[in-house]
Amino acid sequence: MTAADVKARIVGGAAVLYPGAYLNRLKGEVLENRCQEFLIKGVRRLVINFEETELINSIGISILLGVIEAVNAANGILLLSNLNDSNRELFEMLGLLSHIQIEESEQMALAKLSVSA
Amino acid sequence: MKLELRKLLHTLNALNELSLEINSTHDFDEVIRASLHTCLGTLAIPKGAIARFSENPRQLKIVAAKGISGAVGQKIELGRDEAEKIAGRAKPIKLQAERNGLSHFVRRNTETFKKLRAHLIVPMTVHGDLQGAIYLAEKISGDDFSKDDLEVIHTIAQHIGLAFYNHRLIVSLKRKAEENRRLYREMKLVYHDIVKAFGSAIDLKDAYTKGHSDRVARYSEAIAKEMGVTGEELEHISVAGYLHDIGKITVDRSIINNPRPLTDREYKELNKHPAAGYEILANIRQPWQEIAYMTKCHHERIDGTGYPQGLSGEQIPLGSRIVTFADSFDAMMTDRPYRARLPLDKALNDLERNTNSQFDAKVVTAFCRILLKEITGATRERVFMPMIGLKFDRQAILEKLHDMASKLDALQANSATPS
């Protein structure tokens, strides 16, 4: 796996993506592409697990907004999970919490999507 | 962490990333796309675009967009007053609230702004000149842009504007540099034509040396190349080949064309031509001074018995040592008033006999290698073949050249070995 790769897996029909330690332009573009690939394949339930993500920069936020819009446009559901305090504060500050659902853990997000891990 | 501090850190981080991106060596379109993302991500704005201003035609043309399909390439025409007013405003313009001087512009482009989801237009200016504009949709939160938000957006816009300004400067400089390179190439062609014309003029003075300067130049260049000379030095050696006899324009034609053996007085007169050539060329500015000196030394001999200075070995510039050889070879292979041209085998014997006395062994070795390649067809270049023709014993000449080259190689290897 190269530095720009984003790990992803399918759990019970939902896609779970792991952006890694730093969501910047490089990772953001890969994340966006992978989400698009899942949407094209018909996967409509997605979880982005931020457990390893320490930092999200402005470009990362902008790309994430694009992902949210793409999922909404495809009538899909996107949940974020495992956000650390810093990133949760950032999302709150930017007013994202009213537009995105956040769960404490990946399991809880999958449960919310009615998917058994 | 307090919200205000969190916001400040996020903004500072965004400005830092923007600066890094703008000063990076990435493709400029990519820089602008990344700058747009940074701007949008700083305040969580889902849609936006960046337009570049051009004076002729006067318009804002979208060069990057996010979240708006088909936006890139869209243009908004501007009147002169409008461009000046937008530049003069220098602060974000709220489209819906615009009442102050640009309302006509806003009304006229309402449909376009709707398509672009534009809520704000942020002018990008440098030194008061409009560079472009950023169109921004509402924030994802739906909250109105605060005064602080507008300040942040304005600062980001100025950064991006500076990137446009610098990019224009670089493009303009590159164009000028390319124009200068083209002029320089043309000037060089003219310069070479003049040099060739001079060479022909010199040869016209001597009924027997038509084409001599041209051949000496070509032989010198080929030998220099074979010896690994490149670039300007190679060019100088070629020019020195053309101009080596320029001093002969000061020598009386009756001496140059004299079919009888020259008297001492006539020799003395003729032998002044290298120094006279130097005097002619030395007053011309660089890079010709080097060429002038090569010309002066083209009758020096490696053993120090030449003229005008009696230099020896590496005191003689490499270019002169090469031209000396090329000059002599051409003289041997052409008819002269006092003798017919020499057969190739005899010429090679003469060259060998005079190696390390008149000629530099390294130059002679290079010549042998070129001639071997030309005769055997190992190269497509035909520098010496047109002069030597086909009337020679191929096998004998090849053996002779191999023999000369290997002997000279061995000699040079020995002289290079420390005792």
Image: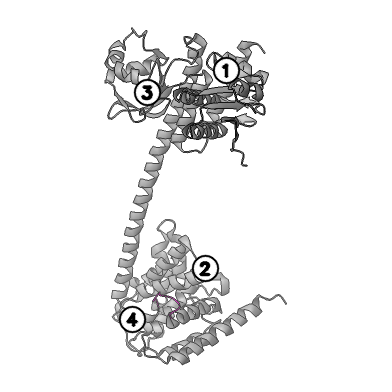
In the image, which is nearer the foreground, mark 4 or mark 1? 1
Cβ atoms at labels 4 and 1 below 8 Å apart: no
| Residue in view at x 57 percent, y 82 percent | B408
In the structure shown, which secondary structural element does the residue marked by tag 4 occupy?
Answer: helix
Residue that numbered label 4 is attached to: B255
Q: What chain is tagged by disc 1? A: A
Circles 3 and 2 on the same chain: yes
Magenta range is B377-383
Rendering coords of residue A66 (x, y %): 48, 25
Spatial CA distance of label 4 from label 2 is: 38 Å
Identify residue type, mark 4. Ile
Identify residue type, mark 2. Gly
Spatial CA distance of label 4 from label 1 is: 104 Å
Q: How is the image coloured?
A: one colour
Residue that numbered label 2 is attached to: B228
Q: What chain is tagged by disc 3? A: B
Q: Callout 4: few (<14), some (14-19), or many (20+) C-alpha neighbours within 10 Å?
A: some
Which quarter of the figure has residue B132?
Answer: top left
Residue that numbered label 1 is attached to: A101
| Residue in view at x 54 percent, y 87 percent | B403
Circles 2 and 1 on the same chain: no
Above or below, comparing residue B405 to residue B245 in the picture? below
Q: In this view of the protein, can residue B265 be seen by the observer?
A: no
Spatial CA distance of label 2 from label 1 is: 71 Å
Cβ atoms at labels 1 and 3 below 8 Å apart: no
Circles 4 and 2 on the same chain: yes
In the structure shown, which secondary structural element does the residue marked by tag 3 occupy?
Answer: strand
